[in-house]
Image (spheres, coloured by chain):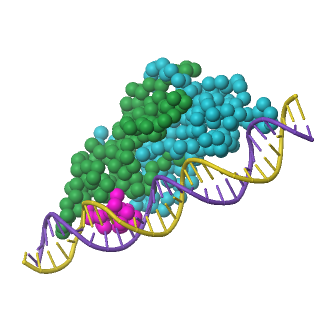
Chain colours: A green, B cyan, C purple, D yellow
DNA sequence: CAATTGAGTACCATTTTAGTCCTGTATAAA
DNA sequence: TTTATACAGGACTAAAATGGTACTCAATTG
């Protein structure tokens, strides 16, 4: 399925919610109500987003969460890695690739290229994009041309 | 992590192995030995690939598995969906999107676009690409320009 | 018919994921 | 300074997905 975890999904929804009123401070409970998701889980998600540096939190009365930087400077990749860790399709596409099968694998190299392409794609999608509920369909030129794959049969 | 499951990983490796000698018939046991992975699991993977129509199998002595069509006509997306089901980043990016939160979500539309872009990318990567162990670095023009995202802040 | 090899199914163990709860701490307002 | 608000952090549990195993059946070849 190559699917995002549910928490990541929540994170995106919540981030978008905050982004739509980026001046205000949002309490965890309010956000959970707004997006109709379980309070404790939303709370957990928010903490992860703070730890990743995407949100800033303020304690106490009138406290809450707000974006650490403009929505246009937060990428989908940022949100995903805040919750799930680095975006990598395979074990070995990570930095600390400790896959013992590299020898017999023979696919690692190319998976890494694919992985990189996806990461690039996700980095080019910003929270501002995601938060926009009425998407104007304008083509966005994505910097995918930069990836290279072997041209075995081309 | 947005990671492939281990089985999917196996599938890719095994498919690549078969693709490198696409004339021959490959017994499950031989393949498992070649790629150094647990026999029963490789076997399971192979069955899934057959069911998805990517491999053909022949029973009996001298039987085994072979590609159902040329490696250049099998995409990474094919392999992934054979094991994990349709490539979709979120519940709602699937056909039968039965997410009850569409109303409060407000992100669904744009995730679907991202999802589509990734699917397109994975469809453009063929088994022939993956199987090539000595990748010639040639830029591949991917048809990503076709996706559109909202241009909120552009 | 016997040997080989895939097909199908059921099952179990492990890991991951999601969700809950509790206690602590910072802040603001009264 | 007191009190209510709201985040921080961690421990814990339940549920689900994943990976791996075992066993029996079916087909093909010689």
Q: Quadrant of residue A95?
A: top left
Figure check: C9 above or below B76: below
- From the viewer's perspective, tell me whether residue D25 is left or right of residue A58: right
| Magenta stretch, main secondary structure class | helix
Q: Residue at x 57, y 20 (%)?
A: A153
Observer-nearest of A22 and B9:
B9
Observer-nearest of A123 and B45:
B45
- Magenta part of the protein: which range? A25-45
Question: In the image, residue B132 lies at what x, y percent?
Answer: 54, 24
Question: In the image, residue A1 lies at what x, y percent?
Answer: 53, 47
Question: In the image, residue C26 lies at what x, y percent?
Answer: 15, 63
- From the viewer's perspective, tell me whether residue B82 is left or right of residue B90: right
Inspect this view and state whether residue B120 appears.
no
Figure check: D19 above or below B123: below
Q: Residue at x 70, y 24 (%)?
A: B23
- From the viewer's perspective, tell me whether residue A27 is left or right of residue A106: left
Question: Quadrant location of the C terminus of chain A?
Answer: top right
Q: Residue at x 65, y 24 (%)?
A: B21
Within the magenta stretch, is there residue A43? yes
Question: In the image, residue A35 lies at what x, y percent?
Answer: 37, 62
Q: Quadrant of residue A7?
A: bottom left
Q: How many marks?
A: 0
Observer-nearest of B21 and B79:
B21
Figure check: B85 above or below A6: above
Q: Residue at x 80, y 33 (%)?
A: B61
- From the viewer's perspective, tell me whether residue A21 is left or right of residue B97: left
Within the magenta stretch, is there residue A71? no
Inspect this view and state whether residue B132 appears.
yes
């Amino acid at each position: 399925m190559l699917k995002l975890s549910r928490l990541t999904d929540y994170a995106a929804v919540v981030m978008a919610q905050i982004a739509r009123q980026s001046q205000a401070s949002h309490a965890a409970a309010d956000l959970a109500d707004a997006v109709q998701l379980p309070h404790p889980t939303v709370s957990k998600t928010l903490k992860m987003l703070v730890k990743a540096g995407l949100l800033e939190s303020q304690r106490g009365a009138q406290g809450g969460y707000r974006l650490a930087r403009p929505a246009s400077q937060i990428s989908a990749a940022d949100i995903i890695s805040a919750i799930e860790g680095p975006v990598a399709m395979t074990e070995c596409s990570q930095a600390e690739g400790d896959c013992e099968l590299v020898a017999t694998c023979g696919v690692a190299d190319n998976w890494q290229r694919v992985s990189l392409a996806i990461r690039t794609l996700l980095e080019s999608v910003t929270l501002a994009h995601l938060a926009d509920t009425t998407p104007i369909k304008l083509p966005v030129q994505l910097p995918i041309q930069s990836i290279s794959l072997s041209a075995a049969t081309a």
